[in-house]
Image: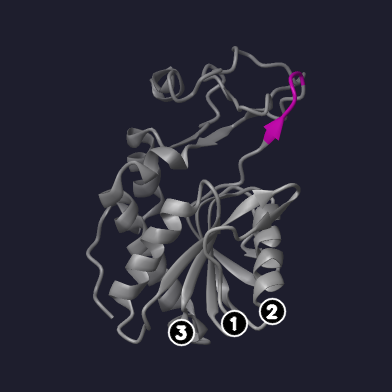
């Protein structure tokens, strides 16, 4: 297996600094003068991750995928991750990431067969394969852009088993951001670019202030007002 050169991906601090500079990830530092962020759901949070920005940068995303695949293979003592046939993620956020991971896996693992990718799309409250799908007896690696509860991945697993019940799943999951605070989804270990338990709350229920109120108004459009989150206070 190739020796990886030290880079910004080697440490949590390096990842956080670079991703903040790219406008991908921000985590509140506890400074009472710094605002929190309002998410599209209307909830307020102490962290923000925008995987779409990362997917706009192919060279960066490929480096991330290479690092995560390498970490997975290094840590998989069962060696079950050496025989993956297909990478699958939920649409839309994980499509580009799944393609990048499949490419990285094929380049790193000399024993890899011709690896494929697929993505599951929402269909009502479930997920389904509408354009391509896993085949019987394939070995599947699941990927996700952001894991909050893991609910989407559970539905993707159900969709896979509906069309190919004989498939086997890798004991690992790769993610760009794991904000769940968990190390595993069921029995599957999560390898993530960013591991941070990011909290969300309703207006007036801030867990970081004495009375639950916001000390300063939350940033409403984090992508447009990134400097308000990252500047010195």
Name the side, left or right, on which 57 lies relative to 220.
left
Q: What residue is shown with label 1?
A: 136
Please tell me which of labels 2 and 1 falls first in the chain: 1
Q: Residues within 10 Å of mark 3 (few under 14, many from 20)?
A: some
Q: Residues within 10 Å of mark 2 (few under 14, many from 20)?
A: some
Whether residue 227 is visible to the viewer of this picture, yes or no, is yes
Magenta residues span 200-204
Name the side, left or right, on which 96 lies relative to 150.
left
Secondary structure under tag 2 reads: loop
- Nearest the viewer among 165 and 231 is 165
| Residue at 37% from the left image edge and 55% from the top image edge | 11
Whether residue 187 is visible to the viewer of this picture, yes or no, is no
Q: Which mark is residue 165?
A: 2
Task: Inspect the magenta stretch and tell me whether residue 182 lies in it.
Answer: no
How far, Cα to Cα, is label 1 from label 3?
A: 14 Å
Secondary structure under tag 1 reads: loop
How far, Cα to Cα, is label 2 from label 1?
A: 7 Å
Q: Which mark is residue 83?
A: 3
């Amino acid at each position: 297996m190739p020796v990886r050169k030290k880079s910004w991906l080697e440490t949590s601090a390096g990842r956080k600094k670079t991703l903040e500079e790219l406008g991908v990830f921000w985590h509140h530092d506890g400074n009472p003068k710094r605002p929190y962020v309002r998410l599209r759901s209307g909830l307020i949070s102490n962290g923000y991750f925008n995987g779409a920005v990362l997917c706009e940068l192919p060279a960066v995303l490929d480096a991330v995928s290479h690092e995560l695949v390498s970490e997975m293979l290094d840590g998989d003592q069962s060696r079950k991750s050496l025989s993956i046939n297909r990478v699958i993620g939920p649409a839309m956020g994980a499509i580009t990431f799944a393609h990048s991971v499949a490419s990285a896996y094929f380049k790193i693992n000399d024993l890899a067969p011709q690896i494929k990718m697929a993505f599951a799309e929402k269909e009502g409250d479930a997920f389904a394969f509408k354009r391509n799908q896993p085949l019987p007896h394939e070995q599947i690696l699941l990927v996700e852009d952001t894991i909050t509860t893991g609910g989407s991945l559970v539905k993707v697993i159900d969709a896979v088993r509906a069309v190919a019940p004989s498939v086997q799943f890798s004991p690992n999951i790769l993610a760009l951001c794991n904000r769940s605070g968990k190390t595993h989804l069921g029995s599957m270990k999560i390898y993530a670019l960013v591991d941070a338990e990011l909290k969300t709350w309703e207006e007036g229920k801030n867990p970081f202030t004495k009375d639950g109120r916001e000390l300063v108004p939350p940033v409403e459009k984090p992508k447009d007002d990134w400097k308000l989150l990252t500047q010195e206070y």
